[in-house]
Structures are given as C-alpha cells and as structure tokens.
Image: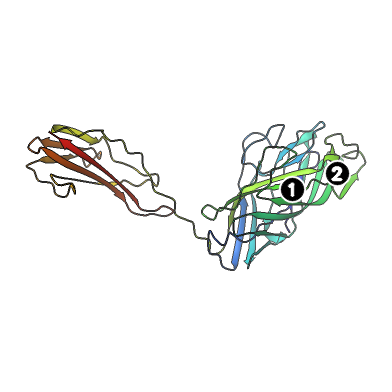
Amino acid sequence: MRTIGLTAAGVLAATALIGPPPAGAVDLTDGPAEVSLGVCAEGSSQTDSFVPNCSYTYLAKRAAPPYTYLTSQGAVSWKDGSLTGTALSFPAAGQTWPALTGLFLNASSAVTAKNITGTVDAAGKVDLALAYDVLLTAGASQCRLTGNVQLSSQATEKLGGQAAGKNYDPATGAFAVASTTYAAPNAIDVTPAGCLAANIAYDLSQGMGWYLTGTMTLPGAKPVPQAQTADVKLPQKVKAKGKTVLLKKAVVTNAGKKATAKLSWSTKKSAKGGKAKYANQEVSYKTGKLAIRTTGKAKRLYVKLRLSAPATDGYEAYSFTKKWTVKR
C-alpha cells in the first residue's frame, strides 16, 4: 500500500501503488521496480483550474483553491520497489515526496511516506491502495489528515470531474490513476483548534480526490517498438521527357533517421534496372534532393522510388515504395 501526500488547507498527503504489467502486452520477470511522477511546474501549486497530466489532490473548495498539484515543486519517486508475480510493492524508505510551501494562507505540507502496494492486470489496468498522512502547517496551527483511498486506471476523478485514469503502457511506462472512493478523512487532528475544524478552507465532508500520473519501470518490460514513419511529398506524375524532381530534400523519419533513397526504372513493370537509354538520376548528396531526367525514348516507362531506414531504439524499420507509370 502506498502513501502520497498533499495538504489539508493547501496540500494533502497520499500514497499509491502499482503492480505487475499486462501479461499480454509484455513479458515481465520478478525484480526491482520504480515509479516516477514527473515535475509539473505549469501554473502555481494550488489553483481553481484543472491542469492536464499533472498529479493532484482535490478538496472541495470553501476559501482555498481545490486543486493542489503534488509535483509542482519537485518530482515524486518510489524506488527500491519490487515485482513478485503480479504484486508490486514500494517501501516507505524508498519514497521521496517534496514538501509543498506557499499554499493557501502561506501554509506548507509534509507527507509521511508509507508502504505502497498494488496490481496491474493483463490488460494494463492498474488498481492502487493509498494510505495518506499529511501534516499541514499554517503559522502556529497544524492539521494532520489521515485516511485511505482506492485508485484505478479506469476511473475518472469525480470531485474535479475531468482527470481520467490511463492503463499502464509497457511501451512507455506511462500510467494514470484516479480515486474511486471519496470518504472523509478517518482522522483530522487539529492543534490548536480552528485550522481545519471549522472547514474554513475546504468542505471536508465531500471527501478527497486523487489523481496520479507518471511512469513505471518494471523488470523485463521491454518497450514495444513504434512504427517508423515519415512525411513524403512526391510529384503526381513523372515527365515523359525532361527533368522531374522527386524529392526536394532528404526524407527524415520520426525517429530522426535519414531514409536511404533508391531509384530504378525499366520498360518492364518490375521497374528493375536503370538504363541510361531511358533516364538518368540526379542526386545532391548534401541536401538529399533527387530528380530523374527521362529521355523520351520509351513509349512506356516504369519508375520506382524506394525509401528505407533501419530499425533503431524504440522504432521498427522504415520502408516506403512509390511507383509511376510514364507514358510518352
């Protein structure tokens, strides 16, 4: 079970867990595991507005802004975790939660980390059990909120109403979970009285909402290669006689690789060959510009352009073919 923290009058502490990856999508083995909730510095730590892809806790507003962004002042990490079978655990000792300052009424919050546990099924669905323990300090007043909440990658955080969970993606490690339970804190300890007791900052009777988004690294999870693609702009026709520019510059794929261009032509449909009797190619090795100059001696000429790039980290091999039929 894990604990994540944030504030009460401004932040709230919480903990969450994540478990085994989808069996059908990636092969996993027992071993170490980590989770990172990346920095989200967009806007301030507390706002009335929902910021997409930013981990937060939500308390129904009275005077204070309802959204408190957990990673607005630093990333959250869970290290020294382990995956055993389908169970994942992250000890409290391996967790790092940045303290949040400058919250409502200039409050600050400190999170007490707790062990995190959870599961991920074969489809990538993530379910988390989260225990929270947050200490909010505002001047001479202190408030501690403690309780438990369940989160799921197939839930929508209903108090804020906008953040939706996302199943674990073994290719990128990305995931997002939203709270499914909204019970009020099990305990609200206030010293001196008045910090949260009168619900001045929030309506605590509405419960608390959590949304956590980041990446998870699991043992044996190998990224699934993405398709390597490219934007190729070509002429619709090739002149029967004269110069036709086929590529104005080298084609670069989404993996950042220059595609190798191979041009061939023939009076046969296979377009294999390249007799100078029918055409010649003009290439700029500096820019990648490629043109064909046809002689007009063929009543029908088949021209083929092939582009290719080898597979690279995270990307499959790239292949593209275009064929023109040139009639005199």
Q: Are marks 2 and 1 in contact (CB under 8 Å)?
A: no
Q: Residue furthest right?
A: 193
- Amino acid identity at mark 1: Thr
Which one is in front in this view, the residue at disc 2 or the one at disc 1?
Answer: 1
Please provide percent x and percent y for residue 255.
Answer: 39, 47
Q: Is residue 48 left or right of residue 315?
A: right
Q: Secondary structure at mark 2?
A: strand
Q: Residues within 10 Å of mark 2 (few under 14, many from 20)?
A: many
Q: Quadrant of the C terminus?
A: top left
Q: Amino acid at mark 2?
A: Gln
Q: Which SS class for mark 1?
A: loop
Badge 1, how many Cα within 10 Å: few under 14, some, many 20+?
Answer: many
Checking the image for residue 142, the label placed there is 2
* Residue ID for mark 1: 180
Q: Earlier in the sequence, mark 2 or mark 1?
A: 2
Q: Position of residue 292 (x, y in %)?
A: 17, 38
Q: Residue at x 13, y 46 (%)?
A: 274
Q: Say above or below: 307 vs 88.
A: above
Name the residue nearer the viewer: 311 or 138: 311
The residue positioned 26% from the left and 34% from the top of the image is 248
Left or right of 27 on screen, residue 203: right
Picture disc at residue 275: none
Mark 2 to mark 1: distance in Å?
Answer: 28 Å
Residue 54 x/y as whole percent? 64, 41
Q: Residue at x 81, y 39 (%)?
A: 9
| Closest to the observer, 63 or 158 | 158
Return the residue nearer the eye: 77 or 2: 2
Q: Quadrant of the N terminus?
A: bottom right
Q: Quadrant of residue 211?
A: top right
* Horizontal side of residue 319 vs 192, given as left or right: left
In the depicted view, which residue is nearer to us: 94 or 206? Answer: 206
Q: How is the image coloured?
A: rainbow
